[in-house]
Amino acid sequence: MSDLQTLYQLFLQLANETLTAVIVIVAASLLLYNLSNELHDRVTRVSSVLLACVTAAYVADVFVSLQPEQLVYELALRLHWLGIAFLPTALYHLSDALLATTGLPSRGRRKRAIRFLYLLGLLFLLLALFGNSLIQPEGSGPQTRVRAGVLFPIYILYFTVVTIFALLNVTRARRRCLTPKSKQRMGILLLAMPTPVLLAREADPALLQLPLINLSNVIVVLMLLFLAWPLTFFGSRRPESQIKVGLLRAFLRGPASATLALVIILNMRPAIEVLGLPGQEFMPFAVVAAILFWQWFIHLFLPRIENLLIYSAEDEDFPQRLRNLDEQILTRKDFESLLEANLATICDSLRVSGAFIYSTVPAHPELVASVGVRHDLSDPPEQLFSRLQDSSTRANGQERDCLQHGNYCYFLLYSERMLNNAARPVGVLGIHSRDEDPAFGADERQTLDILKGRIARALDDMALQDEISAALEGLLPQ
């Protein structure tokens, strides 16, 4: 029985350490997400203060679990109050910001109250750090506990009163909401905001037994997610689907990945030792493998998860088209590199010393790529293009689409996009003539036709992308 009790206690302790670290990961990740998005909005800024309080309190808790030396242990217990002291003020400050979003900003009283509460939180922090009147550590090592000081009931009164007023503000804000979605989000906040009250047990860990502490940690993790979800929508300039996608991706790639690695580090070593494997040596490989497979899973299934949780049935294809567009967009340098690679293949395959490409899409034809020996055109590009089109017309659809002029053979390149039911020229390919045999054989002509098609498609894509870029330049600022 004693062995089972010992194993049960070890399990509870390990679960407590894991859940505490998970809270730090989730709170810190949400804080970083806030700091990188919509910081212009007051609700986002104030919710970041609340997340910072939660993160600070639980970081100190994680540090305590590492069992440092006695002096550092006591200091870590006192540093819990970096978050606990300001937590009620952060809740009230957030409730004031939410109330302001419903058209009821502070006329001065709530602002003065917030400033006073931050000063009061600073006073409680100083009392916790530099005296024993608020809290008093007792014991040594892992048995060190925090006993409530003579001023601790005053803090509890402060915590309770401020939290009640914060909830009353959110209740008022919910009543003032006019749309169903706003009421729903305020309702979620009203349920989630009391969650940080569970941090009050950090002031005296002896108040709760380990199973209840683990249960409270699970509730804190869930409520942090419920708290972050509606807060992201207030004051945001982005549409709802973009906000949801951003949160989903941030959660899967941040907290979920870190939590997976943490669970493996904290829980796999005992299991591996039971199996007789070297846990310490195997641990890095297990963590790396888990992260790699998790990222692979996200890459494969994230579009499906987004379609399932965020997009409606009629909108499922649109995000995929956007992702395809993002993957296929090339820079100007990418196009030039692609064209030069095709020109190099032409020179190597046809055994010629040089080739170049002129684009006919812009108002003034321009040289976009060249390889090897290239001579300047003897005629202006416009005249050369006109002669090429005349030559192609006289060919009556036969193989004769080449114009021999000077040291070069010129080929007109056509777009695959039809304009008025007719293909339009997008460029000219110039190939240096071979003195010994200016004509091309059947195999060479087949290779040349393939490469001409690739070059024409690249020029066509480049022109199309320029059109998309010009359209986006006008749309994106709006």
Image (spheres, helix red, strand yellow):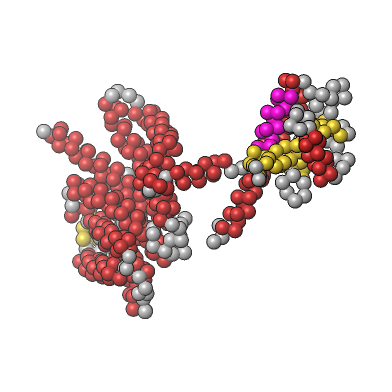
The image position of residue 77, as x and y in percent, is: 29, 54
- Residue 25 sits above or below residue 414 on the image: below
Q: Is residue 53 left or right of residue 207?
A: right
The one nearer the camera, 261 or 382, is 382
Which residue: 30% across, 35% down?
Answer: 267
Q: Is residue 211 left or right of residue 65?
A: left
Which residue: 84% across, 44% down?
Answer: 383
Which residue ends up furthest to the left in the rendered image? 1
The image position of residue 122, as x and y in percent, is: 34, 67
Answer whether residue 466 is visible to the viewer in this image: yes
> Where on the picture, by quarter, is residue 46?
bottom left
Answer whether residue 120 is visible to the viewer in this image: no
Q: Main secondary structure of the magenta part?
A: helix
> Where on the picture, by quarter, is residue 416?
top right
- Residue 391 sits above or below residue 173 on the image: above
Q: Is residue 324 left or right of residue 468?
A: left
Query: From the image, which quarter does the C terminus lie in?
Result: bottom right
Is 99 magenta? The answer is no
- Residue 424 sits above or below residue 205 on the image: above
Query: From the image, which quarter does the N terminus lie in?
Result: top left
The image position of residue 338, as x and y in percent, is: 67, 36
Q: Magenta segment, which residues?
A: 445-461
Which residue: 28% across, 29% down?
Answer: 271
Which residue: 79% across, 23% down?
Answer: 440
The one nearer the camera, 331 or 67, is 331
The image position of residue 150, as x and y in percent, is: 20, 66
The one nearer the camera, 150 or 370, is 370
The one nearer the camera, 127 or 16, is 16
> Where on the picture, by quarter, is residue 239?
bottom left
Is 447 magenta? The answer is yes
